[in-house]
Amino acid sequence: MPADHFLKRQAMSDFIICYDITDPRRLGRLYRYLIKRAVPLQYSVFLFRGDDRQLERCIQDAIELIDEKQDDLRVYPLPGRGLKARIGRPTLPEGIQWSGLPAKW
């Protein structure tokens, strides 16, 4: 194992993964892949929590499911500190809370 492997940041971070897929078959494949690894927030928008290695693996696997010439896959890091809020309908059913998501504005 290379020495620089241990120098990489292994802290858990939050990322928004979103996509615009032109083909219904690829859309379904990507959705089924991401639903196992991230929390759906809206249609085509997911919250992923993991370290750099886990994110890289998730994105590399997702790239295999899309057509890079026709589809759009984006990843945005969320700040560790700062306002994270939602307005409107809850993401999860009533009575179920996940500490990574804000309860209210």
Image (cartoon, rainbow, N blue to C red):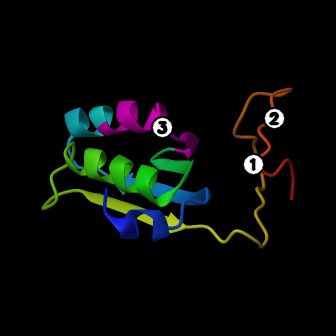
Q: Is residue 77 left or right of residue 3?
A: right
Which residue is more in the foreground, 69 or 34? 34
Q: Which amino acid type is shown beneath numbered disc 1?
A: Leu
Real-space CA distance between mark 3 and mark 1, rounded to the nearest whole angstrom = 16 Å
Q: Reply above or below: 36 against 86.
A: above
Q: Which amino acid type is shown beneath numbered disc 2?
A: Gln
Indicate which disc, 3 or 2, sits on the residue closer to the N terminus: 3
* The magenta segment: 30-42
Which residue is more in the foreground, 21 or 103? 103
Q: Is residue 76 left or right of residue 74?
A: right
x%, y% of residue 49?
58, 50
Residue 66: mark: none
Q: Which amino acid type is shown beneath numbered disc 3?
A: Arg
Residue 37: mark: 3
Does residue 16 belong to the magenta stretch? no
Question: Given contact means CB atoms under 8 Å apart, are the residues at marks 1 and 2 in contact?
Answer: yes
x%, y% of residue 54?
44, 49
Q: Which residue is mark 1?
A: 101
Q: Is residue 11 left or right of residue 21?
A: right
Regarding mark 3 in the picture, which secondary structure is present there? loop
Within 10 Å of disc 1 (Cα), the crowding (few <14, some 14-19, many 20+) is: some
Q: Which residue is mark 2?
A: 97
Indicate which disc, 3 or 1, sits on the residue closer to the N terminus: 3
Within 10 Å of disc 3 (Cα), the crowding (few <14, some 14-19, many 20+) is: some
x%, y% of residue 97?
81, 35
Tell us which disc is closer to us: 3 or 2: 3
